[in-house]
Amino acid sequence: MLKDDFISRVEGIPWSNRACSFDAADCWGLVVLYYRHVMGIEIHQSPDYESGHDFMTCYDADVVFWQPGATFTEDGIFVAWVGSQPVHVGLIVDGRALHSRGENGHVRFDAIRTIQKLFTRVEFYTYAGNRDSARSGDAEGQGDC
């Protein structure tokens, strides 16, 4: 799927906790959909996400599969923090932040600068695949969100 087709299909769909479809998506679900349909990659996701664990638990389990960067890169992700807690994730597409945020929210584009102003800190990552040899094979994922 081309980026433009993906954007047309997801922009404006509602946020829903633990959703990962073209009908609704939470912030992580949107990342999974993008990598699956645009990049052709089944990214790693921990069972903690599917079982409803808090964002911090999911972040700790999955961050090892991402390479940090000093600035944003196309097709990378951002992780937004409030204080000492990561609370939100989104994509970098066409130099902007594509993300699905919060209850009563939806998938939308914002300037990266806007994201940086809304949160205490913003980190940028690119997908690095399976970087944890103790968990060999996990990077292929399950195919479901």
Image: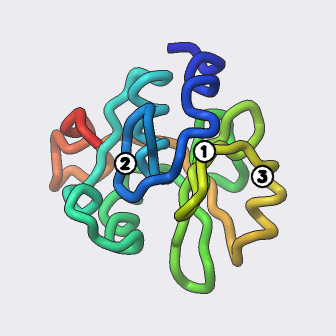
Q: Percent x, y for residue 114?
A: 81, 59
Sequence order check, earlier mark of 3 and 2: 2
For label 2, the residue is 19
Residue at the bottom extreme of this rendering: 83
List x then y, in percent, for residue 131. 32, 48
Q: Which residue is painted at 74% across and 60% down in the image?
A: 115
Residue drawn at x 72%, y 52% is: 71
Q: Which residue is mark 3?
A: 112
- The amino acid type, in three-letter code, at marker 3 is Ile
Please state which amino acid type lies under the numbered disc 2.
Answer: Ala
Near-viewer residue (9 or 57)? 9
Q: Which residue is mark 1?
A: 107
Mark 3 and mark 2: span between their CA atoms?
24 Å
Residue at 60% over, 56% down: 105
Considering every residue shown, the one lying at the far front of the view is 104
CB under 8 Å between discs 3 and 1 = no
The quadrant holding residue 11 is: top right
- Residue 109 sits in which quadrant? top right
Q: Is residue 47 above or below residue 96?
A: below
